[in-house]
Amino acid sequence: MKPSMRTGIAAMAVLAGLAVAAPASADEKRYNHATGRWEKVTTAQQQRMRYQMKSLPAQFQRQEVRISTREKPGTIIVDTNRKHLYFVEGNGLATRYGVGVGREGFGWSGNMSIGRKAEWPGWTPPAEMIVRERKAGRILPAYMEGGPENPLGARAMYLYRGGRDSIYRIHGTNQPWTIGLNMSSGCIRMMNEDVTHLYERADRGTKVIVIGPDGKGRDAIYADAGPVRKDLLSVLFGG
């Protein structure tokens, strides 16, 4: 190989390295090759998210299940009583995720749609929440920029009803231990890795059905027949 060619290749390698190494504060952001964007999350935080996913009780870990429903593929069903969110795949299958839901007095039910989506969303607490938390001795910021410490987590899908923002969201969380619990003010919380997975599949306009904390109406909407059992060959070879 000629010296000039070696020099050119070396220069290209340096430029490629710079493209992935920037920005300077690499410990604060991480390049997501899937989206082609820098994200405010470190490699250590990514590893922690994966560890937290594996630490979830089995019933709240993401898995493929058999489901009986009349809802079309692409529909989201949230059962706040069972703390499960389903993304209907079709052919009698759904992807099931564990979620955290509204605490006592903050449960709700009804049909919504995804009206907006955001990656690493900023958070503006509702005025009534600011007042309520202040009475409890907690001062909330008027606004918090998106990032790993933001309570909305890595992704948010804004739920609309009749073309208007309902103030409820399906979003990630910086409190992964709340998955499977009644802890929120009515929003649907997911593990950051799970909400990112769902975000890539659920478009604006996606129908969202929320079953309330009493489970009323569940049988008319869906029946969960449990996880899909894979044979040994499928497990070994990824089928």
Image: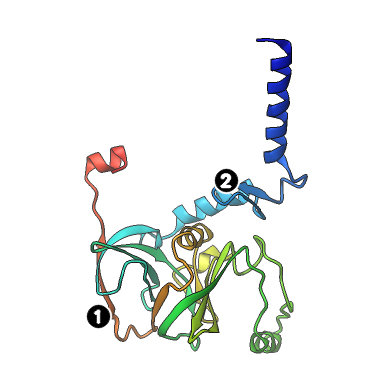
The amino acid pointed to by label 2 is His
Q: Percent position (x, y) of residue 85? A: 39, 69
Q: Percent position (x, y) of residue 110? A: 40, 85
Up/down of 37 relative to 12, above or below: below
Q: Position of 235 compared to 163: left or right?
A: left
Q: Quadrant of the C terminus?
A: top left
Residue at the image point whose x is 25% and y is 80% from the top:
219
Q: For mark 2, does the 10 Å Cα neighbourhood hold few (<14), some (14 to 19), or many (20 or more) residues?
A: few
Q: Quadrant of the N terminus?
A: top right
Q: How is the image coloured?
A: rainbow
Sooner in the amino-acid sequence: mark 2 or mark 1: 2
Q: Position of 104 compared to 154: left or right?
A: left
Nearest the eye: 30 or 165: 165
Residue underneath mark 2: 33
Residue underneath mark 1: 219
Q: Quadrant of residue 95?
A: bottom left
Up/down of 61 relative to 170, above or below: above
Visible residue check, residue 189:
yes
The amino acid pointed to by label 1 is Asp
Nearest the eye: 58 or 168: 168
Residue at the image point whose x is 56% and y is 64% from the top:
155
Nearer the viewer's eye, disc 2 or disc 1? 2
In the image, farthest residue toward the right:
24
